Image (tube, rainbow, N blue to C red):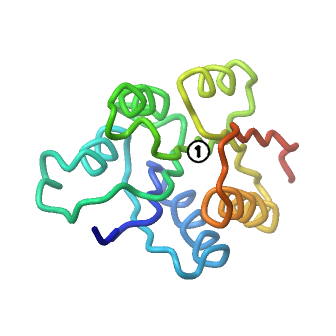
Amino acid sequence: MRRIVEVLVVDDSEQDAALTLDALRRAAPGAKLLRLTDGEQALHFICATHGYTGRPAGMPKLVVMDLHMPGMDGIAALKVLRARSDTEHVPVVLWSSNSNPLFIEQALEAGASGYHVKPTALDAYRAEIDKIAQRWLHETAMVADVSTSKRSA
Protein backbone atom coordinates (compact mmCIF):
# COMPACT_ATOMS: atom_id res chain seq x y z
CA MET A 1 0.00 0.00 0.00
CA ARG A 2 1.60 3.27 -1.16
CA ARG A 3 1.10 6.31 1.02
CA ILE A 4 0.34 9.46 -0.95
CA VAL A 5 0.08 12.01 1.87
CA GLU A 6 2.64 11.85 4.63
CA VAL A 7 1.73 15.01 6.55
CA LEU A 8 -1.71 16.57 6.78
CA VAL A 9 -1.84 20.23 7.90
CA VAL A 10 -5.30 21.28 9.12
CA ASP A 11 -5.60 25.01 9.71
CA ASP A 12 -8.26 27.55 8.73
CA SER A 13 -5.79 30.45 8.69
CA GLU A 14 -4.22 30.98 5.25
CA GLN A 15 -1.21 32.71 6.78
CA ASP A 16 -0.57 30.09 9.49
CA ALA A 17 -1.05 27.24 7.01
CA ALA A 18 1.41 28.81 4.57
CA LEU A 19 3.99 29.29 7.34
CA THR A 20 3.48 25.74 8.60
CA LEU A 21 3.77 24.20 5.13
CA ASP A 22 6.89 26.24 4.35
CA ALA A 23 8.48 25.23 7.66
CA LEU A 24 7.57 21.56 7.08
CA ARG A 25 9.11 21.66 3.59
CA ARG A 26 12.35 22.85 5.22
CA ALA A 27 12.21 20.43 8.15
CA ALA A 28 11.15 17.36 6.16
CA PRO A 29 11.97 17.98 2.50
CA GLY A 30 10.93 14.50 1.39
CA ALA A 31 7.51 14.59 3.03
CA LYS A 32 4.39 14.90 0.95
CA LEU A 33 2.13 17.63 2.34
CA LEU A 34 -1.59 18.36 2.11
CA ARG A 35 -3.45 21.26 3.67
CA LEU A 36 -7.10 21.14 4.75
CA THR A 37 -9.10 23.88 6.47
CA ASP A 38 -11.19 22.30 9.24
CA GLY A 39 -11.65 19.24 11.40
CA GLU A 40 -14.58 17.82 9.45
CA GLN A 41 -12.67 18.02 6.17
CA ALA A 42 -9.70 16.29 7.85
CA LEU A 43 -11.94 13.47 9.08
CA HIS A 44 -13.39 12.99 5.60
CA PHE A 45 -9.90 12.83 4.14
CA ILE A 46 -8.45 10.46 6.75
CA CYS A 47 -11.53 8.20 6.72
CA ALA A 48 -11.84 8.39 2.90
CA THR A 49 -15.46 9.57 2.98
CA HIS A 50 -17.49 12.13 1.01
CA GLY A 51 -15.25 13.81 -1.57
CA TYR A 52 -12.25 11.64 -0.64
CA THR A 53 -13.74 8.17 -1.25
CA GLY A 54 -11.44 7.49 -4.19
CA ARG A 55 -8.18 8.55 -2.59
CA PRO A 56 -5.38 5.99 -2.33
CA ALA A 57 -5.43 3.94 0.86
CA GLY A 58 -3.15 4.72 3.78
CA MET A 59 -3.04 6.97 6.79
CA PRO A 60 -0.98 10.15 7.06
CA LYS A 61 2.23 9.70 8.98
CA LEU A 62 1.39 12.88 10.91
CA VAL A 63 -1.51 15.31 11.30
CA VAL A 64 -0.65 18.85 12.43
CA MET A 65 -3.98 20.39 13.40
CA ASP A 66 -4.97 23.82 14.63
CA LEU A 67 -6.98 23.89 17.85
CA HIS A 68 -9.50 26.64 17.06
CA MET A 69 -11.26 26.35 13.70
CA PRO A 70 -14.79 27.14 12.57
CA GLY A 71 -17.12 24.17 12.51
CA MET A 72 -15.35 21.16 13.98
CA ASP A 73 -12.34 22.24 16.03
CA GLY A 74 -9.16 20.28 16.59
CA ILE A 75 -10.21 18.60 19.83
CA ALA A 76 -13.57 17.46 18.42
CA ALA A 77 -11.87 16.00 15.33
CA LEU A 78 -9.25 14.35 17.51
CA LYS A 79 -11.92 12.68 19.65
CA VAL A 80 -13.54 11.19 16.55
CA LEU A 81 -10.18 9.89 15.31
CA ARG A 82 -9.36 8.33 18.67
CA ALA A 83 -12.79 6.64 18.86
CA ARG A 84 -12.22 4.72 15.60
CA SER A 85 -10.06 1.59 15.59
CA ASP A 86 -8.66 2.38 12.13
CA THR A 87 -7.51 5.90 13.09
CA GLU A 88 -6.82 5.70 16.82
CA HIS A 89 -3.05 5.48 16.31
CA VAL A 90 -2.61 8.26 13.71
CA PRO A 91 -0.23 10.81 15.28
CA VAL A 92 -2.08 14.11 15.75
CA VAL A 93 -0.17 17.13 17.03
CA LEU A 94 -2.31 20.10 17.96
CA TRP A 95 -0.65 23.32 16.81
CA SER A 96 -2.18 26.44 18.31
CA SER A 97 -1.46 30.01 19.26
CA ASN A 98 -3.27 29.28 22.54
CA SER A 99 -1.00 28.42 25.46
CA ASN A 100 -3.83 28.13 28.01
CA PRO A 101 -3.05 25.08 30.21
CA LEU A 102 -6.74 24.12 30.19
CA PHE A 103 -6.70 23.65 26.40
CA ILE A 104 -3.42 21.74 26.58
CA GLU A 105 -4.90 19.41 29.20
CA GLN A 106 -8.09 18.91 27.15
CA ALA A 107 -6.05 18.13 24.05
CA LEU A 108 -3.89 15.56 25.80
CA GLU A 109 -6.91 13.97 27.51
CA ALA A 110 -8.59 13.70 24.10
CA GLY A 111 -5.58 11.77 22.84
CA ALA A 112 -3.34 14.35 21.19
CA SER A 113 0.10 12.98 20.41
CA GLY A 114 1.48 16.42 21.20
CA TYR A 115 0.58 20.05 21.72
CA HIS A 116 2.78 22.88 20.45
CA VAL A 117 2.26 26.61 20.73
CA LYS A 118 2.77 28.64 17.53
CA PRO A 119 5.48 31.23 18.13
CA THR A 120 5.05 34.67 16.57
CA ALA A 121 8.66 35.09 15.38
CA LEU A 122 9.43 33.36 12.07
CA ASP A 123 12.67 31.69 13.21
CA ALA A 124 11.00 30.37 16.36
CA TYR A 125 8.01 29.17 14.29
CA ARG A 126 10.32 27.23 11.99
CA ALA A 127 12.26 25.84 14.96
CA GLU A 128 9.05 24.56 16.58
CA ILE A 129 7.94 22.87 13.35
CA ASP A 130 11.41 21.36 13.11
CA LYS A 131 10.93 19.87 16.60
CA ILE A 132 7.60 18.39 15.50
CA ALA A 133 9.13 16.94 12.33
CA GLN A 134 12.10 15.49 14.21
CA ARG A 135 9.85 13.91 16.79
CA TRP A 136 7.11 12.50 14.56
CA LEU A 137 8.69 12.04 11.14
CA HIS A 138 12.28 11.17 11.94
CA GLU A 139 11.90 9.29 15.23
CA THR A 140 9.45 6.78 16.61
CA ALA A 141 7.60 8.59 19.36
CA MET A 142 5.28 6.95 21.84
CA VAL A 143 5.02 9.60 24.58
CA ALA A 144 2.87 12.72 24.42
CA ASP A 145 4.85 15.74 23.31
CA VAL A 146 4.03 19.12 24.85
CA SER A 147 5.88 22.28 23.98
CA THR A 148 4.69 25.45 25.60
CA SER A 149 7.79 27.54 25.13
CA LYS A 150 7.18 31.25 25.56
CA ARG A 151 5.97 33.03 22.48
CA SER A 152 8.58 35.24 20.86
CA ALA A 153 7.84 38.77 19.78
Which residue occupies 17% across, 55% down?
Answer: 52
| In the depicted structure, whether residue 146 falls above or below residue 136 | above
| Side of 89 where 133 appears, left or right | right
Which residue occupies 29% across, 45% down?
Answer: 41
| In the depicted structure, whether residue 17 falls above or below residue 79 | below
The quarter of the rendered structure image containing the N terminus is bottom left
Amino acid found under the numbered disc labelled 1: Val
Which structural element holds mark 1? strand
The residue wearing badge 1 is 93
| In the depicted structure, whether residue 6 falls above or below residue 106 | below
Q: Total marks drawn?
A: 1
x and y, in percent, of residue 87 in the image? 37, 40
Circle 1 Cα neighbour tier, 10 Å, few/some/many (<14 / 14–19 / ≥20): many
x and y, in percent, of residue 127 in the image? 78, 64
| Side of 94 where 36 appears, left or right | left
Which residue occupies 44% across, 74% down?
Answer: 32
Nearer to me, 95 or 88: 88
| Side of 133 where 120 appears, left or right | right
x and y, in percent, of residue 133 in the image? 65, 63
Nearer to me, 123 or 105: 105
Nearer to me, 119 or 76: 76
Q: Which quadrant of the figure has residue 108?
A: top right
| In the depicted structure, whether residue 73 falls above or below residue 114 | above
Nearer to me, 26 or 56: 56
